Amino acid sequence: MWIIAIVAVVLIAGLAILLTRLGGGKFPWLKFYVQGKESGFIFHEINLLRKLAIENRLENPLALFWSIKQLDRCIKGMIIKARAQQREDDPVHQVFLAKLFDFRKRVEFNLPKYKIGLTTTRKMPMHQKVKLTLPGGGTFVSSIVENLRKYLAISYPQGGKMPPNFSWKNQKINVYFWRAEDAGYVFQSHVMNDFIDQKYPILHIAHSDNLVRSQKRGSIRVDTDRSAHLFALQTIENANEELEKTGGLRCRLMDISEDGAAALIGGRAKVGLPVKIQFVLAKDTLVMCGIVKGTTFNQKKNQSLLHIQSVPPSPKVKNNILSYVYNLFGERDVEDKLAGRKRPSAIPASGPVPRNTVSGGTPGAAGASANTNIAGKT
């Protein structure tokens, strides 16, 4: 029995020495392997992470498991190396890269800024966009004009037509808003005053200390304004990533994430429509398929913003999208510099959106096709 114990001790000691010396230097690689295992990587993947840390000359390789900056540095290095070796399309490389991106998302969402939520409307910022619903009525869009001690002043709600002489005063309302880098919130309130006769019509609504936090972020999305083509699918089972060479509805891709997108089209569209959208990111032509989960209709411009929830993309498409989302190679910086605008920060995708069709409040986009209706194309 004691012989078995001695052999076990020798093997453990030998393994510890081996892991300590892996990569050279005095860094405690045994701790690195333990941390990698606790983070969900298998031994072979931890070996690759160790090599990434060495190749990128990280002073503290353990930072790979908590530092977004170091993760981005190593992921970028991995992509550059794969391109140089012409292994960019290698399925093994793409699967491991996808796992690294998943881990990066997990690390980012563990940051305090994603965990601290609002408990009162008194801390809502100016210009925060909100959606209002009346019991048994329609949906309206507005924004915070001023946050005062006794009430919130909001812009006059834009939406469907109301009965003659309708007044918002004393109406009970439900309010929904999405907080950047956080989640969706819902609260109930009532309208204290209706100033429709003012030069700049506004409403005063009561504060609430009973916010319900829901629809927490599931992925990181970024704004992008680029041309794209939209294709109606017969069913979502027809989803594929084959490039289309002709046809399609000209549109604008307004934002993108690994699990969805927003597209601006001319005319109306219906919720539940299966679609395929084709666009270019960082010189790569990509395809995403999904279901239209919500629409926002701008009656004045005759445009609809489609909120598309995608089917899971292939690792290659997902990795290309995330490389752009995380701005690993600075493509977004270059694009925004050329367009003369400041790059917006990445924000969590808001998840499901209200299914109601809303009039007004949708940003326009030059180049979107007009006078088109795809509601009937199924």
Image: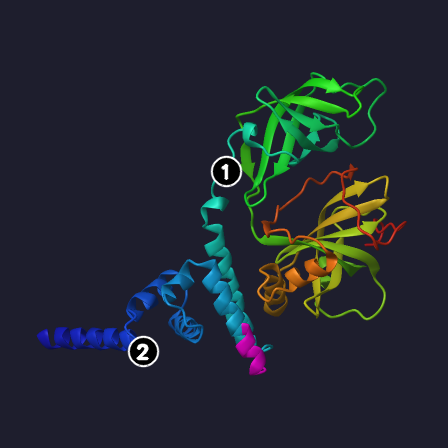
* Horizontal side, residue 12 vs residue 368: left or right: left
- Asked whether 206 or 136 is in front, the reply is 206
Task: Give the magenta range.
Answer: 79-87
Q: Look at label 2 and name its amino acid.
A: Gly
| Tag of residue 24 | 2
- Asked whether 102 or 122 is in front, the reply is 122
Residue appearing at x 39%, y 62% in the figure: 63
Residue appearing at x 83%, y 17% in the figure: 165
Q: Look at label 1 and name its amino acid.
A: Gly
Circle count: 2
Q: Could you tell me which quadrant the N terminus lies in? A: bottom left
Q: Kindly indicate the quadrant of the structure image that contains residue 59.
A: bottom left
* Horizontal side, residue 243 vs residue 12: left or right: right
Choose the circle earlier in sequence order: 1 or 2. Answer: 2
**89 in relation to 357, above or below:** below
Q: Is residue 368 magenta?
A: no
| Tag of residue 328 | none
Residue matched to label 1: 117
Task: Report x, y in % for residue 242.
Answer: 73, 70
Tell me if residue 336 can be seen.
yes
Q: Is residue 85 magenta?
A: yes
* Horizontal side, residue 39 vs residue 334: left or right: left
CA distance for labels 1 and 2: 44 Å
